[in-house]
Amino acid sequence: MQIDRIYYPVLTLGYGRRIGLWTVGCPHACPRCSNPELWPDNPSKDVSLRQLQQWIATITQPIDGVTITGGEPFIQAEELAALTGWLRREVTDDILLYTGYTLEALQAMNRPAVEAVLADVAALIDGRYVDEQNDGAALRGSANQRLHILNTRYTARYREAAAGRRTVQNVLYGDRLLTIGIPVRGFRESLRQKLPEQGILSRIEEGEEHGGEPLGEMAPGTGSVPRL
């Protein structure tokens, strides 16, 4: 499965301390997308399910959930189904998945792998990103996107999260500074202006605001494994 980055703990995309995982490849090409570098297919980012399992096994702190975004996770539907199935059985059934497809479009595909993923995840945020509709709501990037709670055990948890305020989390990812969370409209332009004013040279990555540690490297305090 092509995965660009994985990080723990993610504190801004769902309840609690979560694993964040960003897939590679996206057909939607939404204007003002935060992650255009994740649009192209990139075989160099292939990671096996076994490697992901080994990485996750090194986490010693509580895992409250997993958030999967991209890129467009469903363009790797078979690999995604294998991952979400294992996560639900062995790690947590609080899986939040972002997709540019609508739920109705996914259901109309009539693909067993897509149906398996929808059966595994607790919540789905669907729809393309529309920059003009970035209204600052928690969890959603733009107002056209919808939160579908697919596991009713988590109805209260996701309703509370959706009613909260939008926050971001700044982390070092290798040699990059990434921001985890969904930015307000114009965030990057503002940051580009303000950092030089403080004498800070920056290379702002054009990625959706869900950063992460390089695969095989853990966040401080969670242990480490060799680079995969």
Image (spheres, rainbow, N blue to C red):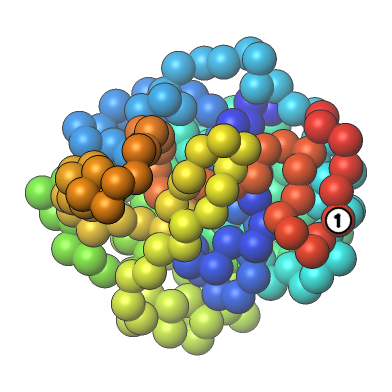
Is 105 placed above or below 228 here?
Answer: below
Tell me where residue 46 appears, x and y as whole percent. Answer: 70, 22
Q: Which residue is mark 1?
A: 223
Which of the 4 image quadrants contains residue 51?
A: top right
Q: Is residue 133 left or right of residue 63?
A: left
* Residue sitting nearer the eye, 104 or 87: 87
- In terms of secondary structure, where does tag 1 sit? loop
Tell me where residue 194 appears, x and y as whole percent. Answer: 21, 51
Q: Residue at x 58, y 61 (%)?
A: 10
Tell me where residue 125 appears, x and y as whole percent. Answer: 41, 56
Q: Is residue 193 left or right of residue 164?
A: left
Mark 1 Cα within 10 Å, few/some/many (few <14, many 20+)?
Answer: some
Which of the 4 image quadrants contains residue 152?
A: bottom right
Tell me where residue 108 appears, x and y as whole percent. Answer: 42, 38
Is 100 placed above or below 90 here?
Answer: above
Quadrant occupied by the N terminus: top right
Quadrant occupied by the C terminus: top right
Q: Residue furthest left?
A: 132
Q: Is residue 214 visible?
A: yes
Q: Is residue 88 left or right of residue 145?
A: right
Q: Residue at x 35, y 81 (%)?
A: 164
Is 26 placed above or below 128 here?
Answer: above
Q: Residue at x 61, y 80 (%)?
A: 153
Question: The residue under label 1 is which amino acid type?
Answer: Gly
Is 136 placed above or below 4 here?
Answer: below
